[in-house]
Amino acid sequence: MADACLFCRIARGELPVPFLAESVRCVAFRDISPQAPKHFLVIPREHFDSLNEIKDPALVGEMMIMARDVAATEGMDVSGYRTVINTNADGGQSVSHVHVHVLGGRKMHWPPG
Ligand code: 5GP
Ligand code: ZN
């Protein structure tokens, strides 16, 4: 399953997707279909279908810290940005490898749809 998973393949460097940041356990890269002027994803290198499957709280922390740090690199730390984890059908998750969306470069609306 993880062999064929799109985001596992990106994390392994099998697809021509530049990393904005990488660490031992996580990578960040731009979303292929940006929903804001800045839109990138942070994923763990290890495959988890969704947030539901992650047992290690430190891994969630590492994803969020990378999200924060790349948001700063992208110049959004002061203007602001949004972090989102969609989970399963009602959450709107379309890729079954857990990922944090980071969106910015414009004002975000609330509530989300
Ligand atoms: P979800 O809907 O699961 O929360 O988010 C999946 C995200 O992955 C979407 O925003 C979609 O645009 C992005 N995505 C899907 N396929 C690719 C791809 O091949 N490359 C990149 N960089 N992003 C992708
Ligand atoms: Zn995967």
Image (tube, rainbow, N blue to C red):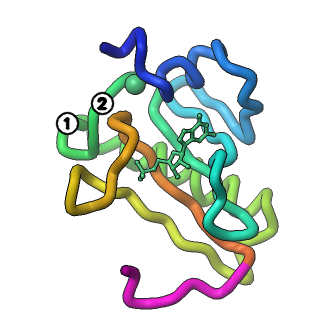
Distance from mark 2 CB to nearest ligand 2 atom below 8 Å: yes
Asked whether, in this view, residue 109 is left or right of residue 54, the answer is right
| Disc on res. 77 | none
Question: Does the beta carbon at disc 1 come under 8 Å from ligand 2?
Answer: no
Relative horizontal placement of residue 34, taking residue 2 as reference (left or right): right
User: Residue 53, which numbered label?
Assistant: 1
Counting residues from the N terminus, which is met first, the one under dot 2 or under dot 1? 2
Residue 50 shown in magenta: no
Whether tag 2 and tag 1 are in contact, CB under 8 A, the answer is yes
The image quadrant where one finds the N terminus is top left
Q: Look at label 1 and name its amino acid.
A: Glu
The range drawn in magenta is 106-113
Residue occupying the point 35% across, 24% down: 47
Query: Toward which corner of the image does residue 37 lie, by quadrant?
Result: bottom right
Residue 58, image x and y in percent?
35, 41
Image location of residue 82, percent across then percent down = 54, 72
Question: Does the magenta stretch mainly form a helix, a strand or a loop?
Answer: loop
Q: At 44% across and 90% down in the image, what residue appears?
A: 110
Q: Which residue is mark 2?
A: 48
